[in-house]
Image: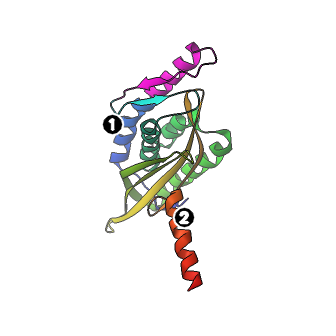
Amino acid sequence: MEWKKYAASLDGAIVVNKYSSFLNLILACSLLVTLFISGNKEEKIILQPQTLGSDAWVTQSKGSQSYMESWGLYLAQLQGNITPKNIDFIIERLKPIMSPKVYVDMVDEMNIQAKNIKDDRVTIRFEPESVFYESETNRVFVTGQMFQKSGNATEVKSIRTFEYEIRIRNYAPQINFTTNYVGNAKTVSELAKDDAKTKKESEQ
């Protein structure tokens, strides 16, 4: 990941506080569901948090499009606005939903990002513009504008995408994969288009 280009602003701290209540609500619902639902039937839980544009639902192993997209948006807001001051807070919020196979790498990368922000005296803010859930891969893509400024230099704007593979286990989300990159979302359809274009060019 290109963490070195990140930094943080007051806007990032505000975003963290705004979305942390949503995370706490979902985790609380997941805990209650796990404790009280029994039997072989896979119950569907309907959620109506204010942060969602439409009703969401979650079962023991699946989540609706709006549910998955809301989690992806929340995660991108957190990771896109990391600062040396809020890094510990963010790690604690993400720790319960990170799978063991990505936890160490993800925490290390966020700590490196926070150190680079401090050492390079860079400020950034991430403004999401679109979110898309790809059901065939269980991945959520959040694309938006990343604004970066170092010292008195002019602020630089770029398109950045945060990508997450989110699985539902016992009614709770689990991050199995995460990355971010400059440019638009690399969905299955977009990658297929790129492959077809490359193949066509090589045949000419």
Where residue 21 appears, as percent x and y from the top left, is 40, 30
Residue 166 figure quarter: top right
Taking the image as shown, residue 124 lies to the left or right of residue 62, namely: left
- The residue to which callout 1 is attached is 53
Taking the image as shown, residue 127 lies to the left or right of residue 59, namely: left
Residue 52 figure quarter: top left
> What amino acid is labelled 2 in the image?
Ala
Residue 67 figure quarter: top left
Where residue 141 appears, as percent x and y from the top left, is 47, 51
Taking the image as shown, residue 160 lies to the left or right of residue 176, namely: left
Mark 2, secondary structure of its residue? helix
- The residue to which callout 2 is attached is 192
Q: Is residue 28 magenta?
A: yes
- Identify the residue at horizontal 52%, vertical 54% (top origin): 113
- Alpha carbon distance from label 1 to label 2: 30 Å
Where residue 51 appears, as percent x and y from the top left, is 35, 34
Instruction: Work out whether residue 72 can be spotted.
Output: yes
Q: Which residues are magenta?
A: 25-49
Q: Nearer the viewer, residue 127 or 10?
A: 127
Of discs 1 and 2, which sits in the foreground? Answer: 2
Q: Is residue 128 magenta?
A: no
Q: Nearer the viewer, residue 32 or 119?
A: 32
* Tag of residue 197: none
Where residue 162 appears, as percent x and y from the top left, is 48, 53
